[in-house]
Image (cartoon, grey):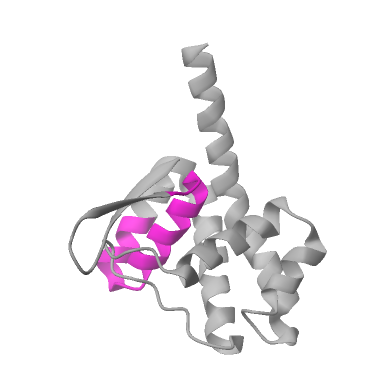
Amino acid sequence: MQHTFLTADDGHPVTIDLREPEAQLITMLRFWTNGISGQSRVWNSLSHDLGAERASACLLAFDEVLRLIRQHGWGRLTPGAPQAPLSEQERNFARFVLMCVEADREEALQHALFLVTPAAMLPLFLAAGRLGLPLICRESRCRLQRAMRDG
């Protein structure tokens, strides 16, 4: 799926191929750091898409992931402004979260080493899996609904 971001230099839109969960993770990351209004926007979107109970669990995992990166990370996770171009750091964050759900556990843990100290690898992996799973399930449900509607 393609999502459009605006470039900072000339304001022209740039289309980037991202899966829906990746785009949602990047949007969550960008808005969550913008205070109460951004966090409300993230909550409203998730609770609409997932239901209140799943949204709450997803946000708890998201908060845990951010806390682990903040406390044990090798560097800062710096999200862009809502309409800024996608950074490599944001893309890697989103891919890591999906990898924790979909990929080989050892591979995901190796990637965790680039984000946090060894002591925080497993907690980060587990929290990222709890964060990514509801987003991937939603993507699958949407695909199935489209196939049934179009099919």
Name the residue: 39% across, 72% down: 79
- Residue 89: percent from the left, percent from the top? 48, 72
In the rendered structure, does residue 43 fall within the stretch colored magenta?
A: no
| Relative vertical location of residue 93 with respect to residue 18 in this rendering, above or below | below
User: In this rendering, would 143 be left or right of 23?
Assistant: right
> Between residues 137 and 23, which one lies in front from this camera angle?
23
Furthest residue to the left? 10
The span picked out in magenta is 17-42
Indicate the quadrant where residue 100 lies: bottom right
Q: How many marks?
A: 0
Name the residue: 53% across, 29% down: 143
User: In this rendering, would 78 be left or right of 34?
Assistant: right
Give the quarter of the figure containing the N terminus. Answer: top left
In the rendered structure, does residue 29 fall within the stretch colored magenta?
A: yes
| Relative vertical location of residue 98 with respect to residue 111 in this rendering, above or below | above
Indicate the quadrant where residue 71 lies: bottom right
Is the magenta region chiefly helix, strand or loop?
helix
> Between residues 95 and 139, which one lies in front from this camera angle?
95
User: In this rendering, would 20 be left or right of 6?
Assistant: right
- Residue 29: percent from the left, percent from the top? 42, 66
Name the residue: 32% across, 64% down: 85
Furthest residue to the top? 151
Indicate the quadrant where residue 30 lies: bottom left
Name the residue: 57% across, 72% down: 65
- Residue 31: percent from the left, percent from the top? 33, 65
> Between residues 48 and 82, which one lies in front from this camera angle?
82
- Residue 50: percent from the left, percent from the top? 48, 43
| Relative vertical location of residue 2 with respect to residue 84 in this rendering, above or below | above
